Amino acid sequence: MNPILYALPGNEELRDGLAAQWPADHGALEVHRFPDGESLVRFADAPAGRDVVLICTLRDPDTRLWPLLVAADTARDLGARSVGLVAPYLAYMRQDQQFAPGQAITAKHFARVLSAHLDWLTTVDPHLHRVHTLDEIYSIPTAVVAAAPLLARWIEANVERPVLIGPDAESRQWVSRVADLAQAPWLILEKTRLSDQRVELTVPDVARWKKSTPVIVDDIISSGGTLVETIHQLREQGLRRPVCVAVHAVFAQWAYWALLEAGAAQIVTTNTIAHDSNAIDIGAAVAETSRALLARLPLRGAASARAVAVA
Ligand code: R5P
């Protein structure tokens, strides 16, 4: 039987994009907010005996997590055979170490909570840095979609004479891969973070790229501080207005406008998070990866045993 896809609120477009590439049924899931801030989840289409796929990208994770966990547990209570999550943007991955004494390593805690409620997880380019693979912190099967081929294809089709620029050491993994695929030159800057919004950059001499189109590539644009400073530095050295390409359009507060004001010629993102800058579709890759993961799961027996125990 086909799996059944349920979108958490705000993820309907993402669900439709996946459903177009995946022989799966749509299910209706309602999340009601009471005036006091509590919420109530209801499956309008029964998931009994089905492989349930919850779709919930995790920007604003603190508000999204609770309804998601209740939906996962409820699906199981109602007899779902398995319950997986497609979260194209996986939150908290940047908090992967104690940066100051007494701090939480939230990536690990978040992983523990999701692993306790779900049978599997698919995501797109999680911020793997000090955590090298999701298996280090997630105890459920996970699959990662790499956006690099899609970014490379977009750059090849839309940018003349690109030179790819990564703003920090962490971006090297994406920039080098995208540059290889797009057959473009690339360079990496050095970044020191000063605060939530401010960073300091060390930029090599880039004068030789004055006739090229700078393409700043990063995985996440959050406060926008990293890219704003990168744009300033490149412009100061006389480079053209850059194109900014990112996987996850987090865009906290006024970040998007700050980038435009700093001199971005164009801002392009994938649709892991819905945003006006989305121009690169991850739907087909996520659907294919999730289908493949679901097909090879060893969890059938375990999942139904867990469902029976909960009921
Ligand atoms: C950090 O290493 C990431 O790759 C991004 O560069 C960072 O998260 C961007 O954050 P912000 O937009 O707040 O500077």
Image (spheres, rainbow, N blue to C red):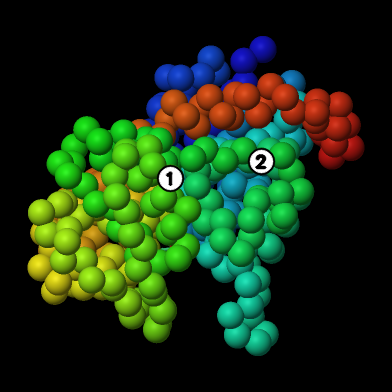
Residue 142: which numbered mark, if any? Answer: 2
Residue 28 visible? The answer is no
Residue furthest to the front:
208
Label 2 packing within 10 angstroms: few (<14), some (14-19), many (20+)? many
Front position in the image: 236 or 31? 236
Front position in the image: 138 or 176? 176
Query: Residue at image x 28%, y 72%?
Result: 204
Give the quarter of the image for residue 141: top right
Front position in the image: 180 or 289? 180
Task: Determine if the C-beta at disc 1 is less than 8 A from ligand 1.
Answer: no
Q: Position of residue 215 (x, y in %)?
A: 24, 53
In the image, taking residue 199 as reference, residue 25 lies left or right, namely right
Kind of residue indicated by mark 1:
Arg
In the image, taking residue 63 as reference, residue 177 lies left or right, namely left
Label 1 packing within 10 angstroms: few (<14), some (14-19), many (20+)? some
Circle 1 sits on which residue? 177
In the image, taking residue 47 as reference, residue 208 lies left or right, namely left
Residue furthest to the bottom:
101
Residue 15: which numbered mark, if any? Answer: none
Q: Position of residue 297 (x, y in %)?
A: 74, 28
Query: Looking at the image, is 58 positioned above or below residue 227?
Result: above
Query: Residue at image x 67%, y 12%?
Result: 1
Query: Looking at the image, is 235 positioned above or below residue 99?
Result: above
Q: Secondary structure at mark 1?
A: helix
Label 2 with label 1: CB-CB less than 8 Å:
no
